[in-house]
Image (tube, rainbow, N blue to C red):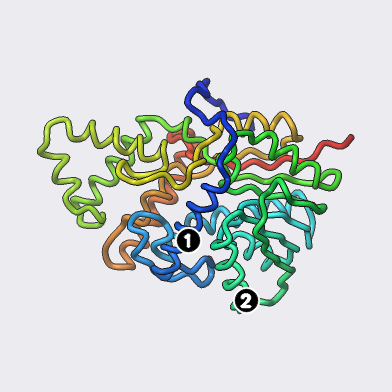
Amino acid sequence: MKYPWPSVSEKGKMSARCDYKAEATAFNERIKNRSKAGFVPDIRRAVKCEYFYKSFWRDPYFIDLYLGEIVRNFLRMLSENGRKNLRILDVGCGAGYISLELARAGHRVTGIDISDGCIKLAKETLRTNPFKKDFGSLEYMVMPFWNTTGTYDAILFSGVLHHLDDPEKAIKKALSMLVPGGLILCHEPCHEMWRKEDASQVALIRGLLSLAGFWYEDKTGEGLCVKKDAIGRYIDEIYDEYINERDKDETAQSPNDNAASGVKILGQLRRNLKEIEYKPSFSFIYRLLGGLRGPAKKIEKIADFLTSYDKYCVNKGFLKPNYFYFVGRKKRA
């Protein structure tokens, strides 16, 4: 499927060489704070964690709705286009939660990351893994992608390529390590596709949830009703939040976050690979589910509805996606 991408300028994107030392430092600090708060980087053993005030990581139920869906899509793509027991490189694996699920599905996985803090936690999580039936293999290494060697059947980039100022260089590096006909799988942001119309739907949802007492900011809906131009400003704030992937008073995830746009990434994937599948991902739930508050059974029903609504509207084109999946095969010489 060729998705109708808008024409956008790359002006303002990072053109200088990315600072990976600063990047590693940022992710080390991030994982340290999460670990102190009780974060468990395992989809199957995750626990409720109030450190995440609005992220899906707040509750195992939300984690499965969002991240679980991503993992299930990856496993389907590998099954449909590869075979069992694949040698997979998970680039920028972070704390290892996707690597772990790939290995649990029987694949031979190597997870690499520049953050030694993330890799340390990933190794500890693997050490205590109780789900050993049909487990393939899994090793983690603190390793810049550019220094990686080996031969793989599939290479995974999940939320990684947009941290690189030259994603084509990374794609070509990956191709050099793939077997003939090997796969590259991606799940990357395409924030430039998102519109004020999409932000207005999120504003409506959050406002109604707030008025009903199911949103973490309990005065949001009330304030939108009485303050002049408040709704317009709120829509603008939400739009900026999703485009930048952070709240207005929140620092960036890392120095190189959003160094490359989705347009640039997808174009270079299509240029260098034989496209097998393009699939739009979610529009808004990853920054909404964790903000739900209330009795668990009620909140889970609301989360189910919002997730189904997001998926349906993206598939029908009523909402623009904020992320996309891509599967490509190495072209044979």
Mark 2–mark 1 Cα distance, whole angstroms, equals 18 Å
The 10 Å Cα crowd at callout 1, few under 14, some 14 to 19, many 20 or more, is: many
- Is residue 280 or residue 92 the one in the foreground? 92
Q: Quadrant of residue 139?
A: bottom right
* Secondary-structure class at tag 2: helix
Quarter occupied by the C terminus: top right
Q: Is residue 217 above or below residue 119?
A: above
Q: Which quadrant of the figure has residue 36?
A: bottom left
Q: Amino acid at mark 2?
A: Arg
Q: Is residue 236 left or right of residue 1?
A: left
Earlier sequence position, callout 2 versus callout 1: 1
| Place of residue 217 in the rendered image (x, y in percent of width and height, measured from the top left) | 22, 52
Query: Which residue appears at 34% of the width and 46% of the height?
Result: 250
Q: Which quarter of the rendered picture does the N terminus lie within?
A: top right
Numbered mark located on residue 127 in the image: 2
Residue 323 percent location from the top left of the image: 52, 41
Residue of label 1: 31
Q: Residue at x 25, y 56 (%)?
A: 216
Q: Residue furthest right?
A: 333
Q: Position of residue 18 (x, y in %)?
A: 57, 38
